[in-house]
Amino acid sequence: MTYRELVIWLENRLGTCHLLVNRAAKEPADLLQATGLHDRLVRELLQAVYKANRCYHIRALVSAECTLAALQPVREKVLDRPATDLSTVRLLDIIDTAVREAFAVPTPSPAQPTGGTSQVIALPRWSRLGKVG
């Protein structure tokens, strides 16, 4: 898969409200036509993918390993911001899923506790919480 094909794949999965691709573009800077809901984040992610895959033009091949590795630092940076909202987190999840689908890479299963013991902590019922104070 080429970088250009990946961006078009993401446009098809995310919708044009997040990504509007200029299919006639020759340079990576011209690939996105309009601003989307999370314009800066999407541009930052696409730049990270371009650099991580050492692309020299938009028709350069990209790999699943380099692409997924490029997404992770940007994701961590965004999640560390105190002002990150739920829609941004959902967008990051959708992008990760779409990239995995593009390369037919399975989504990792959530980490299961290994060994040790687990304990369920009982929380007070909501009706009791309303009467406090």
Image: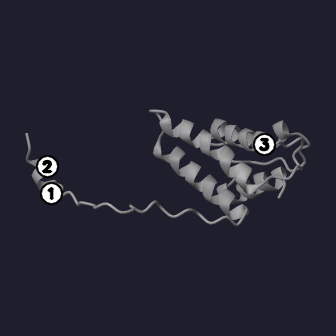
Check residue 129 in the rendering and tell me which mark sits there, or answer none: 2
Q: Which residue is mark 1?
A: 125
| Callout 3 amino acid | Tyr
| Figure quadrant of residue 64 | bottom right
Foreground pick, 106 / 16? 106
Residue at the far top: name it.
Answer: 82
Say which residue appears at 61% left-offset and 59% top-offset: 97
Q: Image quadrant for the N terminus?
A: bottom right
Q: CA distance from mark 3 to mark 2?
A: 51 Å
Q: Which residue is mark 3?
A: 50
Q: Position of residue 65 (x, y in %)?
A: 71, 54
88 is higher (above) or lower (below) than 82 = below
Check residue 133 in the rendering and tell me which mark sits there, or answer none: none
Badge 3 marks a residue whose secondary structure is helix
Q: Position of residue 83 (x, y in %)?
A: 46, 33
Foreground pick, 86 / 57? 57
Say which residue appears at 38% left-offset and 61% top-offset: 113
Q: CA distance from mark 2 to mark 1?
A: 7 Å
Circle 3 Cα neighbour tier, 10 Å, few/some/many (<14 / 14–19 / ≥20): many
Q: Earlier in the sequence, mark 3 or mark 1?
A: 3
Q: Image quadrant for the C terminus?
A: top left
Q: Kindly check if marks 3 and 1 are in contact, taking CB atoms under 8 A apart as contact.
A: no
| Callout 1 amino acid | Arg
Badge 1 marks a residue whose secondary structure is loop
Q: Kindly check if marks 2 and 1 are in contact, taking CB atoms under 8 A apart as contact.
A: yes
Badge 2 marks a residue whose secondary structure is helix
Q: Position of residue 96 (x, y in %)?
A: 62, 54
Would residue 47 appear left or right of 123 to someone viewing this image?
right
Foreground pick, 73 / 84? 73
Would residue 37 appear left or right of 120 to someone viewing this image?
right
Would residue 23 appear left or right of 116 to someone viewing this image?
right
Q: CA distance from mark 3 to mark 1?
A: 50 Å
